[in-house]
Amino acid sequence: MRLWSLHPRHLDRQGLTGCWREALLAQAVLAGRTQGYRNHPQLERFRAQPEPLTAVGVYLEVLAHEAAGRGYSFDLSRIDSRPGSSPDIAPIPVTDGQLDLEWQHLLAKLAQRSPADWQRATALHRPEVHPLFEAVPGPVESWERAAAPPR
């Protein structure tokens, strides 16, 4: 499961649609509708929120908004807890070390499957963060299990 901390505008088509599916799975886990992935480490940051389903709902809405801007139609009715236009949820901190690891991981994926997206991405100085998250100084998050890809 990869719930990107990066803004979904950086994801290619496969990354965006895959993230949508994974976030829906995360929502099902948090809602207690599935037995699989219950202990997945990436869910820790959502479980730590006062309203985990609202937090994952915000996450999903941002993905759906990005998809709509690209001409895709993600089914918003699949989001359990839709917070509305001005969600009252504090940003979730994510370390710059985690963002760096995810950026390198994404660049490696883009280099293999989406060369045009990779070209645009490598021109960026610093990627944007998903609006649910707020970058803070620090190393890779304790819940991260992926090894840093080679640069």
Image (tube, rainbow, N blue to C red):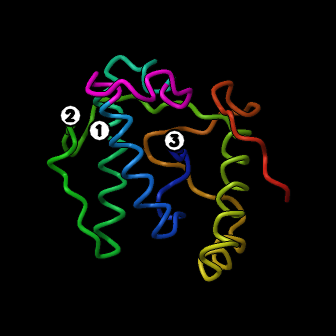
Q: Check residue 82 in the rendering and tell me which mark sits there, or answer none.
A: none
Alpha carbon of mark 3 to alpha carbon of mark 2: how far?
A: 21 Å
The residue stretch that appears in magenta: 29-43
The amino acid beneath tag 1 is Gly
> Where residue 66 sits in the image (x, y, percent)?
36, 63
Q: Residues within 10 Å of mark 2 (few under 14, many from 20)?
A: some
The amino acid beneath tag 3 is Met
Residue 51, compared with residue 129, is above or below; it is above
Q: Residue at x 44, y 46 (%)?
A: 131
Residue at numbered disc 2: 81
Q: Mark 3 or 2 closer to N-term?
A: 3
Residue at numbered disc 1: 57
Whether the residues at callouts 3 and 2 have beta carbons within 8 Å, the answer is no
Which of labels 3 and 2 is toward the front? 3
Residue at numbered disc 3: 1
Residue 41, compared with residue 116, is above or below; it is above
